[in-house]
Image: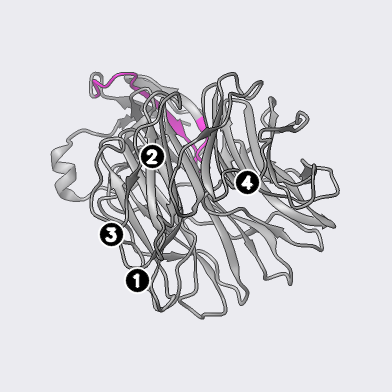
Amino acid sequence: MRCCILVAIFVALTQHPVNAQWEPDRRLTFAPHMSQASLNSQRSVATGPGPTVHVVWNDQRDTAWEIYYKRSTDFGITWDSTDVRITKDSNASEWPSVAVSESTVHLVWMDDRDMPGQHEIYYARSLSAGAAWERAVRLTSAAGLSWYPSAAVQGPVVHVVWCDTRDGDWEVYYKRSTNSGATWEPDVRLTDMEGRSYMPSIALVDSLVHVVWFDELNIIYPEIMYRRSADAGVTWQPAARLTNDQVSSVNECVAASDRYVHVVWENVPRTLESDVYYRRSTDAGLTWEPERRLTNAPYPSIYPSVWAAGEHVHLAWPDARNTTLNYEIYYKSSFDAGTTWSQDMRLTDFPATSGGAHVCVADAVVHVVWYDYRDGNPEMYYKRNPTGNVGSEEPPTARARTPNVGPTIVRGVLSLEVGSRQHTAYRAELLDIAGRKVLDLRPGPNDVSSLAPGVYFARQTHGVRRQASSVTKVVLSR
């Protein structure tokens, strides 16, 4: 029997996300010792290729802190039963950051295996999407401490930033590999300030490299600083100061997509009731709009994590607005590149602290990981929204401006309007409710009568980075 198909038009470039689809919390670790996510300036979760989700964390089950890894190969629906121990030495291995390009997973962390208390940056990679891991290599070898690495990757070029005391004070350093981590170029010092330069975060768009950190600038209040490279890290433009407040601006995180750069941080007034602040650039970091306050709760909002995909921006953070003794994970998003934001949404609700939130997206799915004390000791937890990156119902004014934006359906045939998009590298595909691609679509008629009944999303994208131009919700029923 042919499918009878009902269509409701949804558009990705809208003001508010689809929040109703958040699924229950899932516990990822079960060892009777501490499991803890990294700092927000790093990345404890990444995605790719396709439906694969990668999570890394610090773990004390082996007495000393070690780096552990776990993955899902179906957009977070199920997870490998065994945690993978990446490091195996008697000293501390801590604060990992993960990045993915195609099937290669890149992992960096700080490690004092060579001399107790003398942390260096180490690196390991998997060429099989996390199925097997190569032996770790040491990236730094200088007097002083090397802490809090943050990694990003574009194709074969891997970028790592960290903070380092080799020069007597904390400075931000940078290193890259141009062959997927096989070999590494020399360290490059990015900061030369009198005060401490600390906790760098990195994001990429093609050859544009964006780095932020907080810097004491020889004054009492730390400020957020920014620096970029337009040639994949070969040369660097001068640093820019993003904040100038009589409060501490710390614990920053950066995300970038197309020409947009998004920076979030924790603004700590003298009352210590910090809030999340935000600043964006719409021209790839050349100029910056005024800062904006994203949270306004009576108790601290801390360590924000941001991720960008096209004009969709996702934010997660720990928040103590319910009680000063119990942080919970909160979330909000923007579907117009940061112009407007949704209301704060509480993701956890348990009488124990939740911390270390990290967010990322893949196709339609939003992934959030954190550590949680609900089990008596901190364990890694995960939550997902399978349709959180596809948009919400289009307002009438927007619909009037974009007639015939969605496909039409006639008796089991999904028809995309020929010539409706003139963008470079246009493509369309049909996703299931989990965000997995089930069918490539072409302009004109597409036979969908053989698909199982349920909810699907027809997504149209354009550009080399596959920016979403529209998403249509498609309901198939017998």
Spatial distance from mark 4 to mark 2, Cα to Cα?
A: 38 Å
Q: Is residue 427 magenta?
A: yes
Pointers 1 and 3 in contact (C-beta within 8 Å): no
Front disc: 4 or 2: 2
Which portion, as a residue range, is magenta? 421-437
Task: Assign a secondary structure to mark 3.
Answer: strand
Q: Secondary structure at mark 2?
A: strand
- Crowding at mark 3 (Cα within 10 Å: few <14, some 14-19, many 20+): few
Give the residue at x 39% y 78%. 298
Is label 1 in a helix, a strand or a loop? loop
The x, y position of residue 392, in whole percent, is 33, 49
How packed is label 2: few (under 14 Cα within 10 Å), some, or many (20 or more)?
Answer: many
What residue would you read off at disc 4? 77
Q: Earlier in the sequence, mark 2 or mark 1?
A: 2
- Amino acid on which the number 1 mark rests in the picture: Asn
* Residue under label 3: 292
**Label 1 sits on residue:** 296
